[in-house]
């Protein structure tokens, strides 16, 4: 299952998976694009391994890495608890 995490000002969506039994979480990022339909990239936490970048520039990717790095503790916590709504008690 994938859970919504954050929508950036430019419409970029960040979602994450449940935490698997090894403690790994998939973070998927996508942004609509008029020419390419969607730009997307995948990150795996806690390792911080980035894969399958399609369409994001080096500058955009650096920004996304900063966003994910600075919020990785929250993503991991939410992933362990079944998403934001469960972690927040909603």
Image (spheres, rainbow, N blue to C red):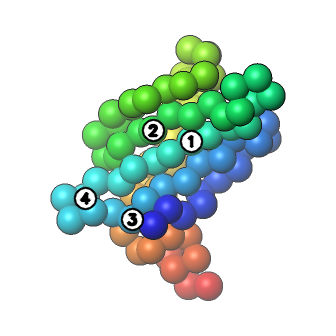
Mark nearer the viewer, 4 or 2: 2
Seen from the viewer's position, the closer of residues 87 and 1 is: 1
Q: At 36% across and 54% down in the image, what residue appears?
A: 25
Say what secondary structure mark 4 lies in.
loop
Query: Are dots 2 and 1 in contact, CB under 8 Å?
Result: yes
Seen from the viewer's position, the closer of residues 56 and 47 is: 56
Say what secondary structure mark 1 lies in.
strand
Residue that carries the numbered disc 1 in the rendered image: 29
Q: Residue 67: give x, y in percent of width and height.
A: 57, 38
Mark nearer the viewer, 4 or 1: 1
Q: At 44% across and 74% down in the image, what residue appears?
A: 82
Question: Which quadrant holds residue 73?
Answer: bottom left
Residue that carries the numbered disc 2 in the rendered image: 42
Residue that carries the numbered disc 3 in the rendered image: 18
First along the sequence among labels 4 and 1: 4
Most extreme residue toward the left is 22
| Quadrant (top left, top right, bottom left, bottom right) of the C terminus | bottom right
**Would you call the spot at circle 2 few (<14 residues within 10 Å), some (14-19), or many (20 or more)?**
some
């Amino acid at each position: 299952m994938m859970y919504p995490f954050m929508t950036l000002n430019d419409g970029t969506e960040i979602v994450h998976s449940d935490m698997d039994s090894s403690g790994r979480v998939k973070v998927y990022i996508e942004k609509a694009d008029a020419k390419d339909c969607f730009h997307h990239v995948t990150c795996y936490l806690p390792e911080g391994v980035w894969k399958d970048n399609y369409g994001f520039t080096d500058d955009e990717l650096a920004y996304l890495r900063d966003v994910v790095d600075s919020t990785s503790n929250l993503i991991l916590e939410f992933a362990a608890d079944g998403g934001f709504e469960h972690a927040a008690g909603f």
